[in-house]
Image: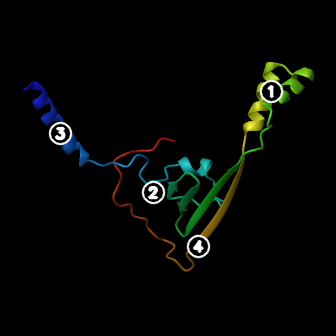
Amino acid sequence: MKPFVFVLTMILYTQTFAQWSKTWGEEKSFIENKGQFEELYAIPDRSPILYAFDGDKEDYFFTKNKLVFRFIQVKMKEKEENEYEEMRKFAKKGFNAEEWHRHEVEELRGKVIKEFITAEWIGANPNVEVIAEEPTTYYHNY
């Protein structure tokens, strides 16, 4: 009897939670600027940012009369095929562990390429008011 009750309970329990769904990851939303975007994401003309979407490889910034897109690409340096041989060359030159570490950090550092596209609303109301709707239930830390 106990195995039957256990199996029945598990079936009902599983069916209840099978109806739940949640996609893993951050929900996409615009974040009100409270000073966090000026230093981190300075846009080319330094217009005050009102709201922004902070994406992985792209960001969107709203100002009073513009929408600015920032696209980010990271290009990594080519790595030596035989790292052991490279390490031996540096050891022969007299590099110590600290110098080798600095070399590795520099070698792993990628080149960040940022491109901006600005869309400006010509003839728009200069006293525009941006109204936020549907606030999210989570917060962001910067």
Residue at point 35% right, 54% down? 135
66 above or below 77? below
1 or 2: tag closer to the N-terminus: 2
Residue position marked by numbered label 1 in the rendering: 84
Left/right placement of residue 46 relative to residue 34 reads right
Q: Nearer the viewer, residue 18 or 124?
A: 18
Amino acid marked by disc 1: Tyr
Residue identified by numbered label 3:
11
Q: Earlier in the sequence, mark 2 or mark 4?
A: 2
Quickly name the residue at label 4. 120
Question: For the residue marked with disc 3, what is the amino acid?
Answer: Ile
Gap between marks 2 and 4 measured at Cα: 19 Å
Q: Indicate the position of residue 24 as horizontal and vertical percent values.
A: 40, 46
Earlier residue among tags 4 and 1: 1
Number of other residues with Cα within 10 Å of mark 4, as a class: few under 14, some 14 to 19, many 20 or more: few
Q: Nearer the viewer, mark 4 or mark 3?
A: 3
Q: Position of residue 21 (x, y in %)?
A: 30, 49
The image's mark for residue 96 is none
Residue lying farthest to the right in this orientation: 93
Check residue 30 in the rendering and tell me which mark sits there, or answer none.
Answer: 2
What amino acid does circle 4 point to?
Glu
Q: Residues within 10 Å of mark 2 (few under 14, many from 20)?
A: some
- Judge by depth and name the residue closer to the eye, 67 or 113: 113
**How far across and down, in percent of the image, does residue 62 sit?**
52, 63
Residue pushed farthest bottom?
A: 123
